[in-house]
Image (cartoon, rainbow, N blue to C red):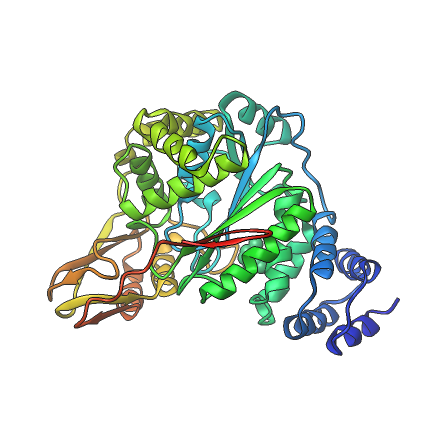
Amino acid sequence: MRMYDLIEKKRDGGRLTKDEIDFIINGYVDGIIPDYQISAWLMAVFFVGMDDEEILNLTQAMAHSGDMVDLSPIEGIKVDKHSTGGVGDKTTLIVAPIVAANGVKVAKMSGRGLGHTGGTVDKLESIPGYRTDLSEKEFFDVVRSTGLSVIGQSGNLTPADKKLYALRDVTATVNSIPLIASSIMSKKIAAGSDAILLDVKVGSGAFMRSVDDAVKLAQVMCRLGEMAGRNTRALITDMDKPLGWAIGNSLEVTEAVNTLSGKGPKDLTHECIMLASQMMVLAGLGSEQECEEKAKRVIEDGSALNKLMLMVKAQGGDESVIADPSNFGSAKIVREVRAPGDGYIASMDSEGIGVASQILGAGRETLEDTIDYLAGIILNKKTGDKVSKGDIIARLYTNDESKIEASLKRFLSSIVIGDNEPESKPLIFARVSADEVIMY
Ligand code: URA
């Protein structure tokens, strides 16, 4: 087999066989096929697409390119969750404890943030002492003793995705449904859970900019999950504005603790209850309505917050910041952002707001950058809110004074103030499984 012929075949609209896809992925991981040929092939896939069987074969080849985690030594149904990435998305920190407090095990590997989106691993590492690099034995022990564990991805999970994603990032081939679906689902399949809930974001801070595209991506991923023997569902959720009020690592952990204490922002609380209840439905705990009630109950009785506390303690973290998040301390510099005029917040560019937070030190531009865990943004107003000139619309937090002006500029250019109240949009657009789409 020659890589040249496979590039040509895909470029001309052909279907690749399982053997051909295995040849490409194994050859790339082994360093036999060079980046420039894979780049050309990625671009051909970007334009021509792939059918379901090709995407499944690509996903399986990527999943098997490294370790496949076997969670079967842990008793019970293990349910995973994946978000396609957003701004202010701290749902894992809330949803995993809710689900675990209802007896469903969560053994989850999460990622770091890059660019405008945050990563759960960085948020957890803002808790002093919290270890995300547990060995497999430690990981399993924490899940067994507390019901949940969230760690970073092990070094050899889906090496094919690591190489391909880095190349896609610099060759303008990220935004392709077959490539996104195989990238996400290869990691989820390799991570070993029995069931998977996908949170597919749509809007200005997401890969998918229309609900139609988000539904298409979700359907492909659900079919991949089912074909791999994993019970899979997706919710399509809004990312046209940040989720909750807080953006930035310790600021988001604080908001997660408040939400688990029943004092969280309305949008975040609602979305977390919906995500958690879908995970419980996947685990066979009852109907959607019953599971929603179960999710609300463990917030009210404090058992979900207790689960977060147990996991943090078991992974070496300082529980005092969960008991009282003011123990995180505060960034040295806090700058108020004031409304430049009267009217309504007509729209927010979530990506731009994520970048403003990244500039303050909350995120990385390259994987080598270090993070200021106290940096970020607390919003005071969001899309649809009425503002008068001079009202505080947000506060920027950083320990580096030199970053304030660039961040402020980016933040203000991400907000549009208009005369008319914008139409309100749903927070959750649809629920998707392999064979149905239910619009909310
Ligand atoms: N997240 C991933 O893990 N992969 C993609 O391709 C896009 C989002």
Q: Residue furthest right?
A: 1
Residue drawn at x 50%, y 34% as measured from the top left: 131
Location of residue 231 in the rendering, given as x and y in whole percent from the top left corner: 61, 41
The quarter of the rendering in which ligand 1 is drawn is bottom right
Residue 59 shown left or right of residue 5 in the figure: left
Quarter of the image containing the N terminus?
bottom right
Q: Which of the 4 quarters of the picture holds residue 49?
A: bottom right
Residue 50 shown left or right of residue 276 in the figure: right
Location of residue 199 in the rendering, given as x and y in whole percent from the top left corner: 48, 50
Residue drawn at x 39%, y 27% as measured from the top left: 309
Residue drawn at x 15%, y 68% as measured from the top left: 343
The residue nearer to you, when weighing 131 against 68, is 68
Residue drawn at x 71%, y 55% as measured from the top left: 56
Residue 79 in sight here: yes
The residue nearer to you, when weighing 285 against 169, is 285
Location of residue 349 in the rendering, given as x and y in whole percent from the top left corner: 34, 66
Location of residue 192 in the rendering, given as x and y in whole percent from the top left corner: 64, 38
Numbered circles on residues, count = 0
The residue nearer to you, when weighing 252 against 292, is 292
Q: Which of the 4 quarters of the picture holds residue 11?
A: bottom right
Q: Residue furthest top?
A: 145
Residue 132 in sight here: no
Residue 98 shown left or right of residue 341 in the figure: right
